[in-house]
Amino acid sequence: MNGETGLSPEMMKVFETLPGLYLVLSPDLIMLTASDAYLRITAKKREDVAGRHIFEVFTPGARDQGGRDVANSLIRVINTREPHEIPVARFDFPDPADPAVTRSSYWRTSHTPVLNSRGEIRYIIHFTEDVTAQEVARQQLTASLEEQTRSAAKALQMSNRMEKLVREIPARIAILSGPDWVFEYTNPHFEAFFSQRSLRGKPLLEAMPELAGHEVLKALKHVYDTGETYSGTEMRIPMVRQDGGKPEDHYFNFVYQARYDENGVINGILSFAYNITELVTARELLQESGEEIQATNEELKATNEDLYQAQRNLQKLNEDLEKRVGLRTSQLLAAREDAIRERDRLNAFFMQAPAGICVLDGPEMIFELVNPPYQQLFPGRNLRGKPLLEALPEFAGHPICDILIDIYRTGKTFEGKEVMVPLASNDDGPVEERYFNFIYQAKHDIHGMVDGILVFVFEVTETVLTRRKKEENEKRFRFLLNAIPQQVWTSRPDGALDYVNQVVCDDFGQPMEVIVGSGWNEFIHPDDLGDCLRKWRHALEAGTAYTVEFRLRFKDGDYRWHLGRALPLIENGQIAFWLGTNTNIDIQKDNEQRKDEFLSIASHELKTPLTSIKAFNQMMQRTDDAERLAGFAKKSAGHIFRLEKLISDLLDVTKINAGKMIYNMQPFSLKQMLADTIESVQHMAPSHQLILEHAEDVEYTGDRFRLEQVVSNFLNNAIKYSPGEKEVIINCEVERDNVVVSVKDFGIGIAEGDLLHLFERYYRVDNTAMRFEGLGLGLFISSEILKRHQGSFWIESQPGAGSTFYFRLPLDSHNVAKAKRIGNTFYQDTTITITYYERSHRIYADWTGFQDLDSVKNGCLVLLEMAEKNRCSKIVNDNTHVLGSWSEAVDWVSGVFFPMLEKAGITHLAWVYAPNVFSRLSANKAAGVAAGNIDTQLFTALSEAEKWIDNR
Ligand code: ADP
């Protein structure tokens, strides 16, 4: 073997016979040799070892921390060429007596590189020392939790300091070979001591003549002759450190041991010596503290067995020294008591904690400690002493496993919140989805290595499931509330608004967050706010139902009357939340107001003819004159007729309201019906001339009596509202399968603002009400009768010049059925033509002829469908070809259809209206009320409408 790179056979022999556990490795970790002691302890033969790679023979397992430490240390030594020591590590060896049994032991290992003259590694000395006894003693002393106490920390600190001290005390090794005891080898410590002398290759007595006659020579001779090991204690030897220098007294503990050749013949002596001069000197200094010294003395004396024994004594001595200088015994005791108390406290906490606590020990994660609440999580399972995956096999494959393994690597604490783990309560029980909050915390051994995990765990399955259920219920509840077509809201028990449904958002034109954030107050009419707040506060305090009438401001800026109600939902005797609704009662409120007005008018209207009748009656009683009597009776009959008419109107309205107006449909001649009605009205009103200008003879099927009522109402109004005028002109024409009747007067006329309202119940134009009798019921009753005949009506009027009242009745009411539809881009029936223009990406709706609610609804829905199918956002709505003018559908268009258009994604609407007042009014009303986010513009010419929309 090359001296620069390997190990000489002699050195090989030395290492093999060393009493310690040595392995010698080449720089590429091939085992060159091992000491006998090493082979013995690992149950290997030399040929198992020599020439093989260390990890081929001692393969470190994945969880073999000790093995990995050795590998890391070796790599480090190869890289740095500096010695390295591994802290105490655990190794599991098969018991030599019974290889099936594994024994754990603790070892301290060091690696020392031996370099050649070029500074390269020749070989590496691997030295291992069994510290099991110390380790076991230490472990017993510092039982698991005590580790965390101050005392343990102190002990640890002390033992570390001791280790350092011991390392600093050098052992000197020399090999004397042959009968002359030639210095064949001396270790660095040895050489450091005799740095000024050259000893190598010289016989002992030649190298150290000062030993002549000393008793150590006798001991050496004895060993060389007999082979018996000799150990000496506190041997005083005069040493000369440099050639020709003065001898100094040195004290040694030492072992001499025979070395044999391959034939078993002694060929040298191994010498291990500890220089304990400083120790002895120190002891001499401590003479006065008798007992301690006595003990030290005795212990020193007892270190005859071997050098390792001496080491331990040195430790003890130093520990004593430490004690003297540092901690006083009493302090130490107090610290210990503190530690015990701390430990008891920890123990009590561990057992009584509300959390499940367990300790998973070692890489197999054995359930080492399990407190009662932890066991309670798995009532039917036996955990103690079992590895985690054996005790709870359902854990396998769960991400938690990776987390646990990771903690061994990183030492980081892990916190889990509501983590779902499928686990069974009993060994054979069903695996259930369970939720846990937990903390995993690494547990460290004295060297700071992770050797287990502390687990704190709370089961939160019930909380999680209950919450989920609640959330689900809430979702369903909100869904229901959103489906209700009126304002619905909820608030917290303290009254703070926390939800409003879509209707509220649509009405106020604000998103829910904004409304919930600002609360109701902003939307309530200032005059109603005080009353509202007072009632709401009272309801909150008393926990009773809340009812209020108030006005709410809508997105168009107008206030609308609402009936607000709220009820507390009581759960377990506590208010869980308030559920409220606001019902739009604007129409009812309006009606109510008009009804009140109506009642006062009605009583007045009924009283007037009655007063007259009463007066005529009195006068009839006072006269016998036949002529006068007849005159009074006739006048009285006129008032009775008026009274009768008023009462029958009232009865009609009641019937309409109750939906009980009965129609008797029969075919009859319209021309004849008109002539008869004109005749009977003319009879009662000689002031005007009723002229039937033109009447087509059409047979019509309907309720003749009710239609007579309509005509007579139109005629009576024409007469009533054209005082001083002479004529009323009546026409009846057939146009596109419809018959249109008109009644024209030259009277006071009607202002634009009133036109759309005339057919409403109790509606009377303000300034006429003062001058003309009437209940405002006639036109309402007429409109109801016409609707039931699928007819419509409209008015053309100019204030001061007169009015023309029209009504229309369809001769064929199945127009819509004649629809023809071509694909998704074209539709046509008798009332509308709808075309989708792909190039300009807009829809054109051309309304034609007479319309009624059904035709408008049908046309609008087709329009909407076509817009959606073509993803079209622009519409041109053309009313120029509508015949008559008619407003009944306006409310439906603005209230229902426009929101539908907006939801379908319509952004622009151009509305072309016909050159008549009704058409303009309808367009204005529909667009004004409902435009919302749709950009709507009104036009009179189609070309302009198209130009505008194409530029959008
Ligand atoms: P009444 O005539 O009993 O008041 P109607 O329902 O018949 O009730 O008419 C409602 C309102 O319409 C009238 O009050 C009046 O203001 C107005 N009105 C009806 N017909 C005419 C007309 N020919 N000229 C002017 N105003 C009219």
Image (cartoon, rainbow, N blue to C red):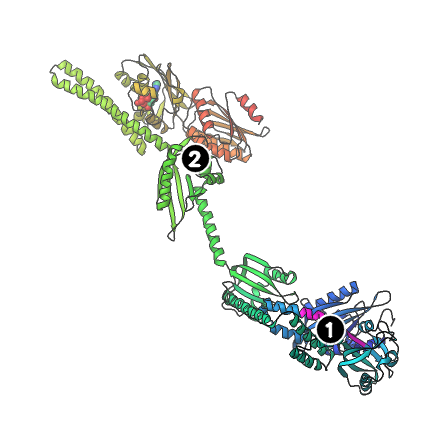
Q: Is residue 354 magenta?
A: no
Q: Is residue 560 above or below residue 311?
A: above
Q: Distance between the residues labelled 1 and 2?
A: 87 Å
Amino acid type, mark 1: Thr
Give x and y (percent) for residue 864: 50, 33
Foreground: 56 or 674?
56
Position above or below: 607 against 900: above
Query: Compared with residue 304, is residue 190 higher up or lower down, i.e. above or below?
Result: above
Going 38% across and 14% down the picture, which residue do you hit?
A: 801
Q: Is residue 940 left or right of residue 162?
A: left
**Kind of residue indicated by mark 2:** Phe
Q: Residue 15 carries which label?
A: none
Start-end of magenta stretch: 159-173
Residue 230 appears in the picture as rendered: yes
Residue 104 in sight:
no
- Which residue is tagged 1? 128
Q: Which of 617 and 830 is in front in this view?
A: 617
**Dot placed on the residue nearer the N-terminal end, 1 or 2:** 1
SS type, badge 2: helix
Can you say which quadrant of the picture contains the C terminus? top right
